[in-house]
Image (cartoon, rainbow, N blue to C red):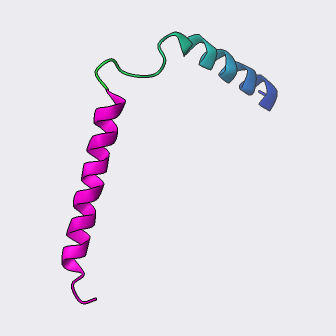
Amino acid sequence: MSLHSNAAQLVTLASEGGEHGGNHESLSPLITGGGAFLVLLVLLWITTRFNRDR
């Protein structure tokens, strides 16, 4: 197989799955982003609690 034929097959495969949009119905971007933000804030808080020597 050549690189060109592999690329053409991947483009065809990607265009067939375009009707779903790639997002799961139960995932909300706002909830996912907000949860990730809160987790990062908690990790930052934990890091600053252990770094009291500065």
Q: Which residue appears at 31% of the width and 26% of the height? A: 27
The location of residue 39, given as percent across then percent down, is 25, 52
Q: Nearer the viewer, residue 36 or 10?
A: 36
Q: Which residue appears at 46% of the width and 21% of the height? A: 22
Q: Nearer the viewer, residue 2 or 35?
A: 35
**Main secondary-structure element of the magenta-colored stretch:** helix
The location of residue 15, given as percent across then percent down, is 63, 15
Up the image or down, 5 lies above or below 15; here it is below
Q: Quadrant of the N terminus?
A: top right
Up the image or down, 18 lies above or below 30; here it is above
Q: Which residue appears at 28% of the width and 34% of the height? A: 31
Q: Quadrant of the C terminus?
A: bottom left
> Can residue 10 be seen?
yes
The reply, left or right, for residue 19 in relation to residue 26 is right
The location of residue 30, given as percent across then percent down, is 33, 33
**In terms of image quadrants, where is residue 16?**
top right
Q: Magenta stretch containing residue 49, yes or no? A: yes
> Can residue 2 be seen?
no
Q: Nearer the viewer, residue 30 or 8?
A: 30
Q: Which residue appears at 20% of the width and 78% of the height? A: 50
The location of residue 25, given as percent across then percent down, is 33, 17
Up the image or down, 35 lies above or below 20; here it is below
The reply, left or right, for residue 32 in relation to residue 50 is right
Q: Magenta stretch containing residue 1, yes or no? A: no
**In terms of image quadrants, where is residue 28?**
top left
Up the image or down, 19 lies above or below 24; here it is above
Q: Which residue range is magenta in the image?
A: 28-54
